[in-house]
Image (spheres, grey):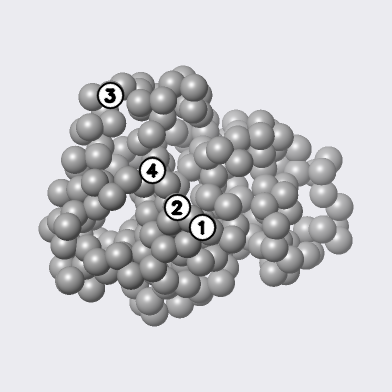
Amino acid sequence: METLRFLYAKFKKYQTVRKNKRMLNEILNPSLFRHDNTFDDLYPQHIQDMSQLHWTPVDIAKKAANFLAIPNARVLDIGSGVGKFCITAGFFHPETAFYGIEQRSELYAFAEIAKEEVDLPNVNFIHGNLTELDFRDYDHFYFYNAFYENIEPDRRIDYAVKTSFELYNLYSRFVYQMLEEKPPETRLVTFHCPHMQVPPGYQLVSNFYSTALKMWIKE
């Protein structure tokens, strides 16, 4: 919590300098979600600099959310970073609850701050490791290959958490088994993920952006 308070104070100071009252009043306008550059302005510069490589593009988030958003369902983003998918999805689908699990305290803190700026009661973020989460609490899933930095050091976000080939295999097996145990009609969206990370019980129903974005339903 001390880390969150420190980042919040630092971020709010940054926000005061960056935004005037008119911009704050427009924060809920759909124009916020038209372009990545506009949305990313919710975050300080070092977070914006990582957007193209690490955060879900707004257009991808919209398309994925349209598939996952079932009224009264609970959708989980596995490795939610600074919350870009959940916030975008939650804005356009208020009847669905979106959750994000993130192990980095700084990214979790910025996700919480951005959520407060946009004021979305159907969006929630969890600080922790995905292996400690009870996946029975969630109905459908979004996964943007959050483990890839374990096998590609040049793409790691920072050095705040340990990365290794062993962790890549551990996390991949964990998610695979979790998905395998979910009931029929479970929906899954993957972005830049290999087929082998999805159990064979899931039927590919749509793909977009040169097959980078895939939509699945468990049979």
Above or below 72: residue 35: above
Identify the element where label 3 is drawn.
Answer: helix
For label 4, the residue is 145
Q: Which amino acid does label 2 sit on?
A: Ala
Q: Nearer the viewer, mark 3 or mark 1?
A: 1
Check contact, mark 1 vs mark 2: CB within 8 A: yes
The residue sitting at 24% across, 46% down in the picture is 196
Does the rendering let one see residue 146? yes
Q: Nearer the viewer, mark 2 or mark 4?
A: 2
Q: What residue type is labelled 1?
A: Tyr
For label 2, the residue is 212
Q: Distance between the residues labelled 3 and 2?
A: 23 Å
For label 3, the residue is 165
Tell me which label, 4 or 3, sits earlier in the chain.
4
The residue sitting at 67% across, 52% down in the picture is 36
Left-right relation of 149 to 21? left
**Horizontal and vertical percent position of residue 142:** 38, 56
**Horizontal and vertical percent position of residue 10:** 68, 33
Q: Nearer the viewer, mark 3 or mark 2?
A: 2
Q: Which amino acid does label 4 sit on?
A: Asn
The residue sitting at 38% across, 43% down in the picture is 145
Check contact, mark 3 vs mark 2: CB within 8 A: no
Q: Distance between the residues labelled 4 and 1?
A: 16 Å
> Which image quadrant is residue 163 in?
top left
For label 1, the residue is 209
Query: What residue occupies the far front of the structure in this picture?
Result: 210
